[in-house]
Image: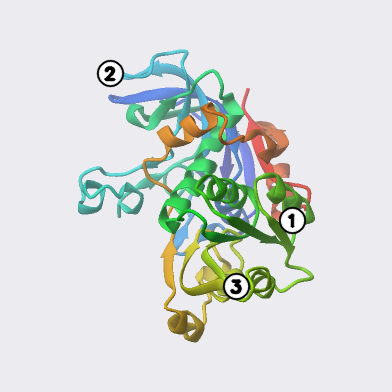
Amino acid sequence: MKAVRLHGPRKLRVEEVPTPEARAGEVLVRVEVVGICGSDLHYYADGRIGDTVADAPLVLGHEFSGVVEEVGPGVAGPRPGQRVAVDPAIPCGECEFCLRGNPNICPTVRFCGTPPTDGALREYVAWPAGLVHLLPDSIDATGGALLETLGVALHAVDLGKIRLADRVAVLGTGPIGLMIARLAKLSGAAEVFATDVNPGRLAMARAFGADAAIDARSDDPAGEIKRLTRGRGVDVAFEAAGALETPQQCVDALRPGGAAVIVGICPDDQIPIKSTAARRKGVTIKLCRRMKHTYPRSIDLVDRGMVDLRPLVSHRYHLTEAAATFERLGRRQTDVIKAVVEVP
């Protein structure tokens, strides 16, 4: 089968590799669509995220859907021919943290497309049957792949604990930020303020429920949010840009006693926040580690028409175009909202 493997920073190759087999408890999924995530771009550009290094050839991609091709011994769930979305995290299920209901912080979790576990930019993936979720007819293959994006946003909003009539800021309106804006409105937020440096994404933010879209190239995001809230600030601020300046902007935009949820992966393996403002305000700071138990809820949100994932996709590519695709996305083209790779 064909697979796209990373051999070092900015070195992607389409190669022929053996097709995996479904072992006991696994299903073999024929991959149809893979979403490209910011973390994939980090590995592509730097060969690492923090202290996690891709020091051997690695298949990227963790947002994916497909069709069950075959099932391994002992599988009583999905059957061949069924369309599925795939949860990319394989926790141990036995440690203290898994047993407390927090598999996303399992110390030994294996994550699709993260060293040393190969990802989905290939034709077939063998995966635990308990981590594949059947798709209703209302969700196509692209929507199935984007359920992972929605799941991360849903987990972030869970962490933010938005209350009815809260005011919310979303700093960074990439796909996850856009989903957070939509979910914040569904959660009862009175106002949602979105910031970005990308005009196209700011326009999308309004379509996803933002009451104000603030251009961070020309305006001070925190200052403008404070002005729009008459000096009070917001109750919850979500950092979804993964930029060095946005964590501090979250703190500055918050009211005293507010909460900041850090979702993005900032460069240089740091989250720059000045202690004085955060301490004096008594700010609660939470970090969003992927997601947990969100696939059934995400599927239900899309199936009921409460969330529409389709407008997120701005670009489609073929598996054999992966190298050029990553090079283009690595230049942060302004017209890209979400790119997906189709694997026919």
Residue highlighted by disc 1: 331
Q: What's the residue type where badge 3 is placed?
A: Gln
Q: CA distance from mark 3 to mark 1?
A: 24 Å
Q: Position of residue 208 (x, y in %)?
A: 65, 45
Residue 221 location, quadrant: bottom right
Image color mode: rainbow
Alpha carbons under labels 1 and 2: distance apart: 45 Å
Nearer the N terminus, badge 2 or badge 3? 2
SS under mark 1: loop
Locate residue 117, reporting x and y percent. Answer: 42, 43
* Residue for point 57% across, 30% down: 305
Q: Residue beneath label 2, please?
A: 73
Question: On the image, which quarter does residue 216 sit in?
Answer: bottom right
Q: Earlier in the sequence, mark 3 or mark 1?
A: 3
Q: Residue at x 65, y 48 (%)?
A: 209
Q: Is residue 338 above or below residue 141?
A: below
Q: Position of residue 335 (x, y in %)?
A: 78, 48
Q: Nearer the viewer, residue 290 or 122?
A: 290
Of 149 and 168, nearer the camera is: 168
Give the amino acid at mark 2: Pro
Q: Which of labels 3 and 1 is toward the front?
A: 3
Q: Nearer the viewer, residue 195 or 127?
A: 195
Above or below for 226 versus 85: below
Tag 2, which secondary structure? Answer: loop
Vertical order, 160 against 134 (above or below): below
Quadrant in the picture for the N terminus:
top right
| Residue to which mark 3 is pinned | 249
How crowded pointer 2 is (Cα within 10 Å; few <14, some 14-19, many 20+) is rated as few
Q: Position of residue 176 (x, y in %)?
A: 58, 49
